[in-house]
Amino acid sequence: MKVNIISIPVRDQEKALKFYTEKLGFLKKKDKPMGGENRWLTLVSKEAQEGPEILLEPAPLHFEPCKVFQDALMEAGIPYTQFDVESVDAEYERLTKLGVEFSVKPSTMGTAKYAVLNDTCGNYIAITEEL
Amino acid sequence: MTYFEKELAKLKSLMYSNQEQIEMVIGVRNYIDNNYDAALNLDFLSQVRFVSKYHMLRLFKRHYGVTPRQYLIDKRIAASKEQLKKGLSVTETCFAVGFESLGSFSSLFKAKTGKSPSEYQKEQLSRSGLPPES
C-alpha cells in the first residue's frame, strides 16, 4: 500500500483547476469524465511530478455533510490541508501579487513557519516551511 | 480572531514559549543540513550549540519528531539520490554524502527506498533517457 492521493473538496472543479494551476503552480496530471459535469481531476507539484496527486473532488456539491464540514472549517479558519514550500515569505509575496487572499500572514510556531490562504473554492490551505 | 488562530496561540504559549531552546534545535538542524557529508555525532552536534547531548537529543526529537540521527540519515539518503541521478557510482555516492561504509549505505538505502542504490540508479537513468512525452 502506498499514499498517492490527497483529496480536497471543491465547490467548482473548473475554478479550482484554474486556481491550483495558475496561482499555486500545480500541474494537471489526470482529467477524465466521471458522470454529469464531474471529473476525476488530479494535480501534481512541478518539483515532484511522480509524487502524490491532489484530487479536486466535487464532493460538497453532491453530499451535504461534506459541505457542512467544509463550511464549519472555513468558519473556524481551519486549513483543510497544508503544502510544504521552500520559503513561506517568498510564496506569500508571490501569491499576494497574484491576488491570492491570506487569512494568516507568515507566522512562526516553534520550528515551523506558516501562512494560510483562501483557495476560493471553499477551503483555507496552509503553506508551511520547517525552520 | 478565528477559532484556529486562538487555538494556535494557546498551543504556542503552552509548547513553544522557550525561544532559546527553539533556536538551539534550529541551529542543530541547520548545521546538519550544511554538513551532512561530514562525520557527525551527538557529542559533536551538542558541542556546536554548547548544550548537553541528551538535552539536545530530547529537544530535537520533540520539535522535529525524529532524532538527529534519523534526520541525518534521511538527509544523506535524499542527497545520495541526487548523486546517483547525476551518474556517480554507488561507492562515490556513499562517501560523497557522508556514509563511512558501503554496506551500511546500501542497506539503509534499501530500507528507506525499497531498492538498492544500483537498482535505483538504473531506473532513474533509463527514465531520463526516454524521449520526452509529447
Image: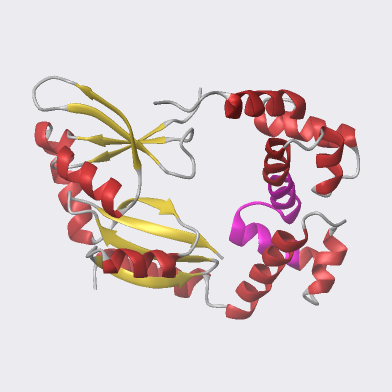
The quadrant of the picture occupied by the N terminus of chain B is: bottom left
What residue is drawn where x is 39% and y is 58%? A127
Which quadrant of the structure image shows residue B128?
top right
Check the image and name the residue furthest to the right.
B101
Up the image or down, A72 lies above or below B123; here it is below
Viewer can see residue B52: no
Region in magenta: B56-76
Q: Camera-side residue: B120 or A77? A: B120
Coloured how? secondary structure
Residue B52's x, y, as percent? 81, 71
Q: Is residue B65 left or right of residue A63?
A: right
Q: Is residue A114 left or right of residue B34?
A: left
Q: Camera-side residue: A104 or B38? A: B38
Which quadrant of the structure image shows residue A8?
top left
What residue is drawn where x is 64% and y is 69%? B26
Residue B60 part of the magenta segment:
yes
What residue is drawn where x is 88% and y is 32%? B103
Total residue callouts: 0
Residue A122's x, y, as percent? 17, 50
Residue B62's x, y, as percent? 62, 60
